[in-house]
Image (spheres, rainbow, N blue to C red):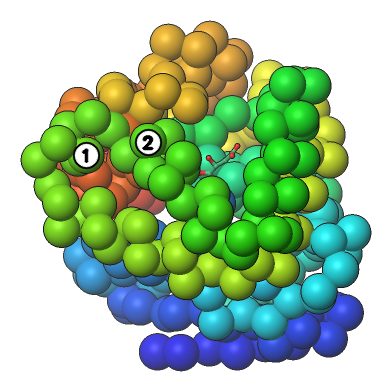
Amino acid sequence: MDLFIDSEDGHRLFARKEGHGSTNILFVHGFPFNHTQWLPQLEELGEIATMIAPDLRGLGASGGPQEPSAYSMAAYSGDLNRWLDEAGWERAVLAGLSMGGYILFDFLRRNPGRLLGLILMDTHPFADSPETVEGRRRSREQVESGGTAAIVDGLMEKVLGVTTRSSRPELAGRVRETMLSSPAHGVIGALEAMAGRADNFDLVVDITVPVLVIAGEEDTLTPPGPTAEWASEIPDSRLVSVPLAGHIANLEAPERVNELVRSFVEYLTSVT
Ligand code: MLT
């Protein structure tokens, strides 16, 4: 089902709703994608979950401001809060991939009481390093002069694992098309929001809900080793690394990730 709401600052936002299971899950995609990043979960987990997967402001079918300064982690997490209100979900499981995870750390700081559980995939709680901020500035300039297409080749190397790149041309093609379809203003806004985000590592030790952390074994942006270091600080967490998957583990190894989400939901049901 297609859903629409208006953001607090008046932009029309889109989300896809699927499933009828008793656990409510809000899925937050990464950069520079849209809700279709979650199709393997939306299509397969409907028996156990009712799922909403928004397009973040400025991406996919969601409207968004033209000015880059109107994008921030706070603006994205404010939009998520509105999606929960719209769904009538006082509390929910929130799942975020990469930039989606950065947004969830912001959400956690502002709205800890709205979480039932967290799924953090191929992400981390830290702010950008100065080198990463500099890289985002260069990406912004490339998109300003050449559109989103100017950064897509470079991103393909980073977001997909070597197995997907060498043996799954159809999936790689879909990932490329999704990135190419992302509007330049939303891509630039996301780059600004990521570059300006706060460090949220201090939150990790105080997370009171169960957390599932997933890292693709072939993820070079957020590899399993460093992920284990911060994830082990979360009181009730389990970290799983997923073979034959890169930075988009849920698309590259959907069966394994769905199995992990199913058993996490079972665990949540047993403790709440
Ligand atoms: C993402 O997948 O959302 C991006 O790789 C995040 C980032 O650029 O830090």
Regarding residue 18, the answer to whether it shows in the image is yes
CB of mark 2 near ligand 1 (< 8 Å): no
Indicate which disc residue 21 carries: none
Q: CA distance from mark 1 to mark 2?
A: 8 Å
Q: Looking at the rendering, which quadrant does residue 61 occupy?
A: bottom right
* 194 w.r.t. 71: above or below: above
Q: Tag 1: Cα neighbours inside 10 Å, few (<14), some, or many (≥20)?
A: some
Q: Secondary structure at mark 1?
A: helix
- Are the residues tagged 1 and 2 within 8 Å (C-beta)? yes
Quarter placement of the N terminus: bottom left
Give the mark, 1 or 2, whose residue is nearer the N terminus.
2
Q: Which amino acid, by three-letter code, is at mark 2?
A: Glu
Q: Which quarter of the frame holds ligand 1?
A: top right
Residue on which the image places disc 2: 157
Residue 9 location in percent, x, y?
88, 79
Q: Secondary structure at mark 2?
A: helix
Residue on which the image places disc 1: 165
Regarding residue 30, the answer to whether it shows in the image is no
Q: Which residue ends up furthest to the left in the rendered image?
A: 167
Q: Residue at x 23, y 45 (%)?
A: 252
